Amino acid sequence: DETGMNESMSMSDDDPDVDDSSSERDAKRIKSNVDQVEWKAELDRVSQRLIVPKATIGDKNWRSFLDSSMEHLRMMDEVSKSLEPQLQHISRTVSGDIEQIATKEAIVNQNF
């Protein structure tokens, strides 16, 4: 609001502790070159996106968070059950490969 801005600026002008040059710099920074009609049109265009839905406000917020957390937990359980055999197979394969590498490394170290 332009009147609120002028009031806050006039209060700083009355304050003896405020440097006049910094007040002038702030006034120049605050001044906008945006047309008020364009600003209001843009505000009308985006205002619906800025409104928080009522479903996320209040006492039901924790309940929806808990429900979504429980759903994610259920999904993770399902995925982990299907992945466990595959991960065990990979673990056995990698362990075998590491043993082979260690054996070959020991042979190379003995020969050189």
Image (cartoon, grey):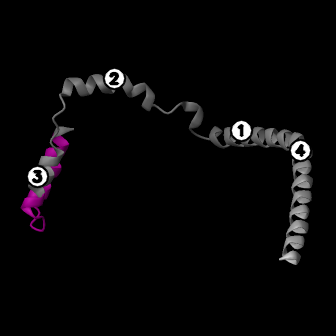
Q: Is residue 65 above or below residue 12?
A: above
Residue 69 is situated, as x and y percent measured from the top left of the image, at 73, 43
Residue 31 is situated, as x and y percent measured from the top left of the image, at 15, 42
Q: Counting other residues with Cα less than 10 Å from the Cα at mark 2, is it few (<14), some (14-19), or many (20 or more)?
A: few
Q: Which residue is mark 1?
A: 68
Give the CA distance from mark 4 to mark 3: 72 Å
Give the CA distance from mark 1 to mark 3: 51 Å
Label 1 secondary element: helix
- The amino acid type found where label 4 is placed reads Gln
The magenta span reads 3-22
Indicate which disc, 4 or 3, sits on the residue closer to the N terminus.
3
Examine the structure image and report whether residue 9 is included in the region drawn in magenta: yes
Task: Identify which residue is drawn at 90% across, 52% down.
Answer: 93
- The amino acid type found where label 1 is placed reads Ser
Q: Which residue is mark 3?
A: 10
- The amino acid type found where label 2 is placed reads Asp
- The amino acid type found where label 3 is placed reads Ser
Q: Nearer the viewer, mark 2 or mark 3?
A: 2
Left-right relation of 66 to 10: right
Give the CA distance from mark 2 to mark 3: 31 Å
